[in-house]
Amino acid sequence: MLNNKNKKNMPIVLNRDLTEKETWEIIKPVCRELYELVNEGNIQFVSGMHNVSDGTYKINLKSNRLHFASRGLKDSIGDIEYNHGKIRIGLRSNGIPANVFVDLT
């Protein structure tokens, strides 16, 4: 059991769920055809979370087609990892650091 002294030293992690609209606003700068992909059912929002304590975002999508590209000074694709039908894309979109997890199955 934690006493009050130990509780003071524990970092506070605040996570906030993202709405679908918030998620699309984060991804839009690096996904050229986002609204076409959404309207055609090629990409679907699953969930999103903002870690308030470190400023990062975690976005989960289901997709059968993607087109990401860094286009501005505040946009960059960091790293991409593929494993068993799932992709993790580390990126900065309009200066916002995010990990996008895509289920391709």
Image: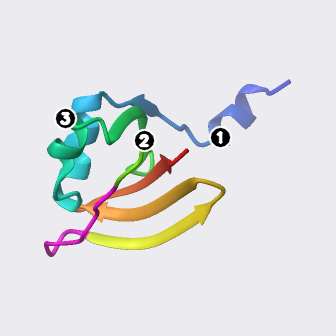
The main secondary structure of the magenta stretch is: loop
Element assignment for label 3: helix
Task: Please tell me whether mark 1 or mark 2 is closer to you in this view.
Answer: 2
**Spatial separation of the CA atoms under disc 1 and disc 2:** 32 Å
84 or 48, which lies in front?
A: 84
* Disc assigned to residue 39: 3
78 or 13, which lies in front?
A: 78
Q: Let me know if residue 42 is in the magenta part.
A: no
Q: Residue at label 1?
A: 10
Q: Residue at label 2?
A: 61
- Across and down, in percent, residue 2 comes to 80, 27
Upstream in sequence: badge 1 or badge 2:
1
- Amino acid of disc 1: Met
**Spatial separation of the CA atoms under disc 2 and disc 3:** 15 Å
- Amino acid of disc 2: Leu
Classify mark 2: residues with Cα within 10 Å, few (<14), some (14-19) or many (20+).
Answer: some
- Amino acid of disc 3: Asn
- Across and down, in percent, residue 29 comes to 17, 58
- Across and down, in percent, residue 100 comes to 43, 52
Magenta segment: 66-75
| Residue 59 figure quarter | top left
Task: Please tell me whether mark 1 or mark 3 is closer to you in this view.
Answer: 3
Upstream in sequence: badge 1 or badge 3:
1
